[in-house]
Structure formats: C-alpha cells, structure tokens
Image (spheres, rainbow, N blue to C red):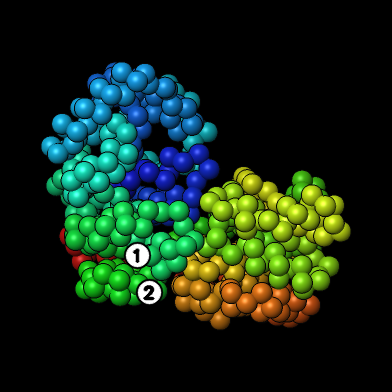
Amino acid sequence: MRTIGIDGRNLALPQGTGVATYARNLANTLHDMGWGVSTLYGAPIRSGVPPLLREVQFFDYLGGEQGKKSVRVIAGDAIKEVVRSPFGFRAVDVVQSGIVETRRFADRLPSESAIFNVDNLFNVARRHFKRHGTFLRVSLPTPPDVMHWTYPLPVTVAGAVNIYTIHDLVPLRLPYTTLDNKKYYYRLIKQCLETADHVCTVSERSKTDIVDFFGTPGQKISNTYQSVDASSWATHDRAVAESEVEGIFGLPPQGYFLFFGAIEPKKNVRRLVEAFLSARLDARLVIVGAQAWKADEELKLVHALHKDGAGSRSRISLFDYVPRALLVSLIRAAKAVVFPSLYEGFGLPVVEAMQLGTPTLCSTGGSLPEIAADASLCVDPYDVADIARGLRMLDQDPDLRRQLSEKGIERARDFNSDAYKARLNAMYDRVL
C-alpha cells in the first residue's frame, strides 16, 4: 500500500485557509483511494516529552494555545537550532490514545492519518533556508513513499519522493497585492523547483506562469486541479438552508449577492463594493471573510457608509467569520456568488458555489476563465462599470441565473473526487 505524507502547516491554523481546504481534501481523497496518509506538523513540542503529554500539547496547540518561553530558553533554543539544523531533525509520532477529547478538531484533521511532529518545524526551516539557502532535512520513523507538500515550504523528507504544490505565483505576478518578502519568495520558489522530484499545481494558468518565470520543464509539473466537496456540507434541503439564513442573518433568500474569501487587495473587494453601489440594486451584498493585509483600504467605502449612517449601510453586511455549515447555507440561499478577483491560481469559491447550484460571477483574472469555462459570468476585474453590468444582469435576468446554475453544476463535476483521484494517480505513477 502506498503511503503519502502531507504537511500540516495550514491545517493547524484555527480558521483555516484555501490551502488548508486543499490539504484536507487531498488527505481525505488519498484515504478514500485506500492509501496510507501521514501528516507532518510543526507544533512547538519538544521531542523528548512523554507520549501522552505530547498528545495533550499537540491538541492544545491546535486549539490556539502556545506556552510562553523565557528569554533564556529562547536564546538556548536559538543556539541549538543553529548547531543542529544543518544535520536535520527527526520527527516523532503523536499517538491518539483516545484519552484526550479531540472531536472538536474533526474537520481539521485528515481522516485516519498518522500524525508526526518536529518542534517548531516551519519556523526553524524558514530560518535555516535564510541562513544556508538549502532546505531543512527531516527524517520520519517510516518515510512515506511520497511527501506531498501542500505549500512551498523549505523542508524535504529523507527517503521519500518530494512533491511541492505551487498554487500560484501571485506574489510575483501581482507583487503589490501581497505582503510577502518578494526576494525571499522568489528564492524559495526557485529552490522548490530545483529541489523537487516533481511539482504539482492546480491549473494550467499556474503551470504556464511557473514555466514562464523559472524556465522549469513542463514535464516536471503536473496540474491536478483541486477536489471540491462543498455538497457534502449541504446536509438539508435548500428550503431549510434558506430558512436558516433568514432566521440567523435576517437575509431574504435570493435577495443578496455573496462574496466569501479573505479581504485583501487580490480579492478586489473595493471595486466590487463600488460596482454594487453604482448598480443601484434592490438586492443586498454580503461579504464574508477574515480581514487580511490592507483590508481597511478594501473596505474603506463600506466603513465610511456605516460611520455616516448613509442609506446604503443596510445594503452591505460584513461578517469576519461564519462556520463552514452556515457558509454553505449562505451560498445556497444567495442570488449569486460574486468573485471578481484580480488573479487566482484556482478559484475555489467559484467551484464550490457551482457545485451547490448557485449562479456565479467571476473575473477574467488568472485561472478563473479556465476553471469556470462558460458556466460563470466573467467580467473585467479592473473595470467597475463592467462588474456593475454583470451584477445588474444577474439581478434582473432569472433565465440567466437558471442557465448559470445548470451549467455550473455540470462544470463542477470536472472537479469532483473521482476526477481528482484519476489526476493524482497519474501524477504519482510518474514519480514512483
């Protein structure tokens, strides 16, 4: 039986990310294929602690708690790290005894995955890469056949085929939209491509960007797209979801447009808000997402309207966070999901909405036209008037919404678990 390792860097984040969704879907798909899965985390847990305490500390870490270290301990750890990192680190297993209550984390832990940990792995690896320009070497008690890194990380697992997933090159294509250190990011991606036995990406657009920027041979890169499982969260019929949304959020079914995703420059929320207000629609706009870098600039107009008590304030609702099950209900009850991002490597929100039968508006940026095909209304993300035109079309044309809903359901089948399994199989067969 093949064993595939994945990293737990994004799985450990308390509110998750698109990459966390990717990692969880990857692990669960591998499990469904009958393969063994192991997950490598970087919780700040010393390798020498007893197994049960290690388990306690690991789930405490997943819960968001990290003990504070004294200056003396931090200094001692720094010295040990500098001395040890050139020789690599050995992971220890985190055995789930059944004594620690872990059901809270069921949606953040891959199904039946073995858990391994290296103390503060990802921070140590980043510092090691900055010092030496090489990837930190990690040994597992039993190395997997493949270590499938779900994100560009400066770590390599000894004795395994190392595959690195590069979702997009947004920090290089649109450098002004991210907070990344561009020099470090460029070096990291370059070294990933040189170190990797193979590279995985999630769209033909991203594959082309990698080849164009770094000259990597196309045969070293596999596009597996992503697996989307939003429908598995739709546990009740649409009428119940609509009642839930109206009761909890006070939103009329089919009476609002929904955006969900991080609030950051790349997502283009500022132009979406301007377009929505200029379109003068009866429908409302609901924005769900954590406020990331430069979120204040993206939401500046919304905050001004709320502060001044303008009539438009009740037409725009902001939610920093909505639990996954409720988000699915919001998607299903929306008139349309709107996602006019400047650039995407895949565009998960669009496919999730299509899978749930909700019409979508997306942009011509990055991979979105490739992913959506003719199943979404595409607009120029830099043209507020064009976004407004798209919103008006969706608002006023029920036949268009019905057509996009039907086409979206069909298009989303290209990203279901069976299609994903076939693409993963083909990639792993190339390297094993």
Would residue 94 appear left or right of 252 to someone viewing this image?
left
Which residue appears at 52% of the width and 33% of the height?
A: 104
Where residue 359 sits, quadrant-wise, is bottom right
Q: According to the image, label 1 marks what residue?
A: 201
Element assignment for label 1: strand
Asked if residue 274 is positioned above or below residue 237 in the image, the reply reads below
Asked if residue 178 is positioned above or below residue 366 in the image, the reply reads above
Mark linked to residue 204: 2
Which residue appears at 63% of the width and 62% of the height?
A: 269
- Residue 241 x %, y %: 72, 54
Q: Amino acid at mark 1?
A: Thr
- Residue 115 x %, y %: 32, 36
Would residue 93 appear left or right of 285 to someone viewing this image?
left
Considering depth in this image, is 143 or 189 the residue closer to the camera?
189
Considering depth in this image, is 46 or 70 the residue closer to the camera?
70
- Residue 234 x %, y %: 62, 54
Q: Residues within 10 Å of mark 2 (few under 14, many from 20)?
A: some
* Count of marks, rendered view: 2
Q: Amino acid at mark 2?
A: Glu
Q: Quadrant of the C terminus?
A: bottom left
- Residue 191 x %, y %: 22, 57
Where residue 203 sits, quadrant-wise, is bottom left
